[in-house]
Amino acid sequence: EVHLVESGGGSVQAGGSLTLNCTASESLDDHTLSWFRQAPGDECELVSRLTIDGTTHYAGSVKGRFTISRDNAENTVYLQMSNLNPEDTAVYYCSTDEVTARAGDCDSPYGDWGQGTQVTVSS
């Protein structure tokens, strides 16, 4: 089991930027890494995914605004978020889940999950 810890969340105004970090307890070299988010009353949705070979996937709503990257030497995956809008407000989770796109909650059995970090965007 990989222990994941997210950080970097916070409150920003619309148009602002944040970078989320997810640090793992072990090497991430052999893991596909994903960022999910869940807003109150909504399902857990995949935001971005980065495969072992460097292929990236982004949800349509964040494409062009968010960038996922990894630093294997630091066992860390990042999510750079720019031009944020209030619809981006959610708890963001990193995970080694590489199959889920949408779920009731961000705790699927298909990978390990962090505890989440809150992102709040005000208009």
Image: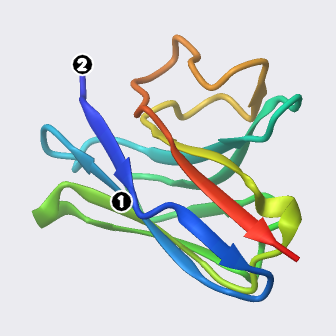
Q: Please state if 56 lies on the left or on the right of 77 as rendered.
A: right
The foreground one among 104 and 50 is 104
Query: Where in the figure is residue 22, as x and y percent of width and height?
Result: 35, 53
- At label 1, which amino acid type do we have? Val
Q: Callout 1: helix, strand or loop?
A: strand
Mark 1 = which residue? 77
Question: Image point 70% across, 20% down: which residue?
Answer: 105
Residue 120, position in %: x, y? 69, 61
Q: Can the viewer see residue 60 in this picture?
A: no
Residue at the image position 58 percent from the left and 50 percent from the top:
118
Instruction: Give the x, y percent position of residue 51.
Output: 46, 52
Kindly tell me whether residue 21 is visible in this rendering.
Answer: yes
Q: What secondary structure is found at the residue carrying circle 2?
A: loop
Circle 2: is it few (<14), some (14-19), or many (20+) Cα within 10 Å? few
Q: Amino acid at mark 2?
A: Glu
What residue lies at 43% left-to-right and 29% top-to-bottom? 113
Nearer to us in this view, 99 or 48: 48
Residue occupied by mark 2: 1
* Quarter of the rendering occupied by the N terminus: top left
The residue lying toward the viewer, choosing from 122 and 104, is: 122
Sequence order check, earlier mark of 2 and 1: 2
* Left/right of residue 31 with respect to residue 57 in the rendered view: left
